[in-house]
Image: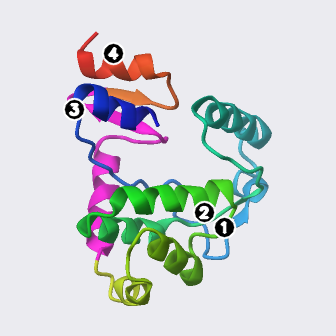
Amino acid sequence: MRTDRLQRDFGVELRWTVFPLHPEIPEEGMELGDLFRGRNFDVGAMLQRLAVVAGEVGLPLMARTRIHNSRRAQELGKWAEAMDKGDQFRRGTYHAYFAEGRNIALLPELEAIAEAAGLPKNEVYDILAQGLFAAAVDADWARAAALAVTAVPFHLFGEKTLVGFHPYEDFVKLVAGD
C-alpha cells in the first residue's frame, strides 16, 4: 500500500480515523443502486474507477452490487488497535469486504476476521454488546466532521489534505512540503 511505503520511506506515523460513510445502511446491507437512487450519481462509473485504482496498487477487488454497514467493524478495529493488532484487523476487514464480498456487519464474519487477526473471537460479542469502543468510534466520527471529511480515503498531514486515490508521488509531495 502507498501508506505502508510512506511509513518506510519517511518514518511517518499513521493515525487511523474511521469515518461514517453511510451509517444509515442496515445490518443486512443494501443494493448500491438503492443507496444512490434519485441522486445524480453513476454507480457503474464509481465501481469502474474503484476497480482501476485497486488494480493499480494490486489490491484484490470483487465486483459487487451490495454495500454493508461498517460501524461494528470500526468498533472492533479500535479494539484491535488497543491490542496492537490494528493493521492485521484492517487488512482482514478490507479483504473480507472488498475481495470476498462478506457482510462485515454480521457477528460471525467479524469473529472470523478477529480470529484471523490474532484476536480472541470469543470476546467479539462482548466488545460490541458492551459498546467498549463505541466512544472511540464516535470521537473519530466527530473528528471527521470537524475536518469536513466527505469522502474516503482522506489523508491529513499538518494542515494539508489529500482526498481520493492518488499516486505515491502525491503522498511524497504532501509530507515533503512540495
Q: CA distance from mark 3 to mark 4?
A: 15 Å
N-term mark: 3 or 2 = 3
Sooner in the amino-acid sequence: mark 1 or mark 4: 1
In the rendered image, residue 119, in percent from the top left (x then y), is placed at: 38, 76
Q: How many marks?
A: 4
Q: Is residue 159 magenta?
A: yes
CA gap, disc 3 and disc 2: 29 Å
Amino acid type at mark 3:
Gly
- Where is mark 3, residue-wise? 11
Q: Quadrant of the C terminus?
A: top left
Residue 11 appears at what percent x and percent y?
A: 22, 32
Would residue 33 appear left or right of 15 to someone viewing this image?
Answer: right
The answer to the question of whether label 1 and label 2 lie on touching residues, with beta carbons closer than 8 A, is yes
What is the C-alpha distance between the residues marked 1 and 2?
A: 5 Å
User: Quick check: can you spot residue 22?
Assistant: no
| First of labels 3, 4 by sequence position | 3
Residue 37: x and y in percent read 76, 52
The secondary element bearing badge 4 is classed as helix
Q: Element at badge 2?
A: helix
**Where on the picture, by quarter, is residue 134?**
bottom left
Q: Which residue is identified by label 4?
A: 173
